[in-house]
Amino acid sequence: MTTTQDAPRTTPEVGGLGHSRKRVEDARFIEGRGNYVDDIILPGMLFMAIHRSPLAHARIVSIDTSEAEAVEGVVAVVTGELLAGYNLAWMPTMSGDTQAVLATDKVRFQGQEIAAVIATDRYVAQDAADRIQVEYEDLEPIVTPQRSLESDAPIIRDDKEGQDSNLVYEWESGDKAATDAAFAKADKVVSLDTFYPRSHPAPLETCGIVADVNSATGQATLYMTSQAPHAHRTVFALVAGLPEQNIRIVSPDIGGGFGNKVPVYPGYVVATAASLVIGQPVKWVETRTENLISTGFARDYHMHGELAVTNDGKILGLKVEMLSDQGAFFSDAQPTKFKAGLFHIVTGSYDYPVAHISTKGAYTNKAPGGVAYRCSFRVTEASYLIERLVQNAAYELGMDPAELRLKNFIKKEQFPYLSPTGFVYDSGDYEGALKLAMEMVGYDEIQNEKEEARAEGKLVGVGIASFTEVVGAGHGDDYDILGLRMFDSAELRIHPTGKAILKLGVRSQGQGHETTFAQIVAEELGIPASDIKVVEGDTDNTPYGLGTYASRSTPVAGAATAMISRTIRAKAKKIAAHLLEASEDDLEWEVGKFYVKGDPDSSVTIQDIAFAAYTNLPEGLEAGLEGVNYYDPPNMTYPFGSYIVVVDLDPGTGQWKVRRMVAVDDCGVRINPMIVEGQIHGGLTEGYAMSSMQHMSFDDAGNCIGSTFMDYLVPTAWETPRFELGETVTPSPHHPIGAKGVGESATVGSPAAYVNAVIDALSHLGVTNIDMPVSADKVWAAMKDSGQG
Amino acid sequence: MKVTVSINGTERSAEAEPRQLLVDFIRSTLGLTGTHIGCDTTSCGVCTILVDGTPVKSCTMFAVQADGRSITTVEGLKQNGELSNIQKAFHQEHGLQCGFCTPAMMLVGSAFLEENPNPTDDEIRWAISGNLCRCTGYMNIVKSIQAAAAMKNEEVSA
C-alpha cells in the first residue's frame, strides 16, 4: 500500500540520491568559521542605527536631528526629507504597494523607521539615534482589521491618491453559485470561526547589510541577509536607479531565514544610500527588537469556514471568508495575481466539487510583512482552517475524525486532480499516509485509552492533520514576483580533471544545498558529490533565479540542476562516442560511464570525457563541458502528509503536554533522508511554537507586545516535543527526479494536529475552538465556559 | 580601560570602553566572529562562551568584567589541530542547520558533559534550555551531545 524509496542507485562514494550524506557546510560552522553579514568587516566601515517611532499612528510635526549630529563620531543623519531629494523616501513592496523608507508625513506602526544615524562606532550610532527628537500629533491607532474597515476609521494610507478606505484588496476564488447550490443540499453545515494569529519567523540571525558603494567606480557591493539575491538586485536597480551591472548582491551565510529575509527592508535602502553619498562602507544589523517589531511578520488571518456535509459523512462543498490584517503597507512577498497568496488551496486533501473563497485585506497600524513564514504563500493558514473544520465536522456527525478523512480523501487514482479552486494536484496517496500514521501511533488503542482516562478524570486528546501543500512556484505564466517569472536556475561546469562547480539562483539558509544539490549532479553524472562544489548567493557569480522560499529550491532549482546535468550528459555521449570510436547509438550509460553495448569493458568514465572535452574533441564539437538551465516548472508540486498528536491535558490547570507526535511525510523522492528528517523536525517545532506559545500581539494603542524574546516566546529544548517520523514516497510525476520539496510541510501541517489534539481532549465538553496560541489559561477558560470544567 | 584575557589559551590585551559588552569585545576587538549575537535580552544564548570553564552569555557581561579571566570560544574547541568530540558529534548527528546557534550549543554541551558524562535526554534538554535553535527542533542536538558523551566514554574505556 505505502511505498518507500528505492535503494540508492549510486555507491556511498558517489553519493547520489537517497544517501544520508553528511553535510559539507558543517566544516566551517562547527569551527566558528561561518561568514554571516555581521562578521563582515571592511576598511573604513561605518555603522548605522535607526530611530524608530514609539507610536503606532501619528502625524510627524517636526524632526530635530541637531543633538544627534553633535555627538562625537557621527558622520551623518539621514531623514526621509533627505531621501526624498534622491527620490528614495518611498520604495515599492513585493506586492506592488509602496512603503516608506523613512517616514516623512506620518508614522503608521510602532517601530517604523524615521531617521538613521551613520557613525564611526556601533554604540555611538545608537546613542545618537536615541537623541533624535520627533514631535508628533496623535492619531487613532487602528489595531484590528475589523475596526480598520469601519466607515469612520481614519485612513491609514492617506499618502496614496484615491485611497478612500483602509481596504487593501478584495479577492475571490471558486464558484459561488455552485457552492451555494451544494450547501442547499447539505444535511449539515459545520462552521468555524478561527483566528490564525500574527507570528514572526524570528531567525536567530537578525537582518542586516554591509553596503559598500565605491564612489570611484560606481560599483555597489551589498552584503545582505537575502533569501533572494537576484530579485533583490533588480529591486535595487529599480528603486535606487543604480545600473544593474554595477550592483553585486552577496548573500553570505544566513543564520536562518524562514521567509523573514525575503523582503527588501528600509534599513538596506538607507545604508546603501548612505554609503553612496558618504563614499564609505556602511553596516547596519538589526537588534532583536527591531527584527521583531518592524520586519516581515506572518499570518494574521481571521477566518470563517463552512463545510457542507451529508449525514453519512460526505463533504459536499466549502465556503470560506477571510479577513487579513496586512499592517501599514501591503508587502506580502507573493505571486502578483493572487492577493491572498495560495490560500485558495484551502480545499485541502479532500474530494468535493465546489468551493468558494472570498478574501479581504485591511491596512492596520502594525508592521508590514505578510511573509510566508516557513510556508508557501499562506498555505499554512489554509491547511489549518480545513483540518480544524474537518475535525469539528467529525464531532458533529458523531464520526471518528480519521474515518471522515478516509471517506473523503482524494483517491490515489484520481491524480492529477483538479481542485475546485483550480490547482492541479500532481500526485498523492493520502490514505496511505494516514493509515501509516495510525499504525505508528496505535490509533485504536489510543482511542480506547482516551475513554478509560476520561472515566478516571484524566484528559487525553488525539489530533490529526492530513495536509496537502502546494510548493515550488512557478509556472511563470501564473506565478511571478513583481513581474519576474518564478523560474530558477543552475549552471554546471565540469572541469578538465572531472571535478565540477554548480552555481545556483537560490540561496540556502541552513537547508544544506551545498550537500544536496551536489547529490543531484552525482546521481545524474556519476561524479562523486565530494568532487562538486556548490556556489550560491553572489549575483556576479551565479545565474539569475528567484531565490529560496516557499519550498521552491528543490522543486525548481533542483529540477534545473537535473536538467543541466542531462544536457551535459548528452554532450558527454558525443565525446564518449569519439573516444570509443563507436556510434552514439551503440553506447549505454551506467552511473559515471558510457560503454559499448555488449562490450562493457569498452568504456570511458565521465572523468575521461571531461578531460577530453578540453583536450580531444570530435570534429565540429565546441570545447568545454558546461551549461546553464533556467527551469520554469510545468506545475507546482504537492507534498502531503498525515500527523497525529496525542496530548495529556491537566483538567486542573489547562496545561497540555504532547505525549506523542507521529509525522508521516511524503515529499516525493528524498535526495538526502538525513536532511529531510532534520527539516521535518524543525518544521514540527515551529508548528508547535505557533500552536502553543508564539504570538505577536498588540495592545489597544498599537504597542507591540512581543518585542523581545522575553515576550515573544519561542520554544526551547525543554518544551519541544519528541517526534516520531514516518514516510511514504509518491514521486512528483513532472519533476525530473520526482522530488517535491519539504522545508515547510511540517510547519504547514502540524499546527492543526496539535490544536485538534487539545480540542479532542475537550470535545466531550462541547468545546469546538480555542485560537492559537492554545495557552493553559485559554484552555482553562474554555473548560469553565463549557460549564463542565 | 585595558582588558587582558586569556582567550583559547592565548593572552590578549585591548582597550575597552567600560560599557562595551563582552560579546562585542570578542567579536569586534579580538576579531573572533564565531561567537554570535541573536537578541538583546540574554534570551537566545547564541553568544554563549565559557568563562573559566562555565557557560556565560557574553552579552550579559561587560568586557571589563572579563579582565584576568580565561575564556573559551568556539574557535578554541579544536585541540592540536583535531576536532573535539562535540564538534565531530554535531557533524555526525546532523546537529546543525544554519549554524548560527551551533558554536554556543557545542560549548554548552561540552561544559555540561564535564559535569555529567552520562546524561539522559531530559538532562540534556534542561542543560541547553538557555539556548534557542530555530532550525533543528533540538532532536539532533540532543543526539549530538549524547554521541559526544559516548565518544568520551569510549576513549576512557579504551
Image (cartoon, helix red, strand yellow):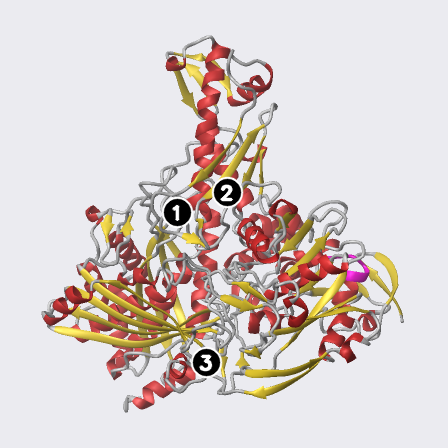
Q: Residue at x 62, y 71 (%)?
A: A102
Q: Is residue A707 left or right of residue A394?
A: right
Q: Is residue A448 above or below residue A700?
A: above
Mark 1–mark 3 distance (CA, rounded to whole Å) = 35 Å
Q: Are marks 2 and 3 in contact (CB under 8 Å)?
A: no
Mark 2 residue type:
Thr
Q: Residue at x 68, y 69 (%)?
A: A82
Nearest to viewer (mark 2 / mark 3): 3
* Residue occupied by mark 3: A155
Nearest to viewer (mark 2 / mark 1): 1
Mark 3 residue type:
Ile
Give the percent coordinates (x, y) of residue A84: 63, 67
| Depth order, front residue of A183/A744 | A183
Give the percent coordinates (x, y) of residue A671: 44, 42
Q: Secondary structure at mark 3?
A: loop
**Letter of the chain that mark 1 sits on in the rendering:** A
Q: Quadrant of residue A487?
A: top left
Give the percent coordinates (x, y) of residue A267: 63, 65
Mark 2–mark 1 distance (CA, rounded to whole Å) = 25 Å
Asked if residue B9 can be seen in this view, the reply is yes
Q: Which residues fall within the magenta stretch?
A: B28-34
* Residue occupied by mark 2: A516
* Residue occupied by mark 1: A476
Share a chain, discs 2 and 3? yes
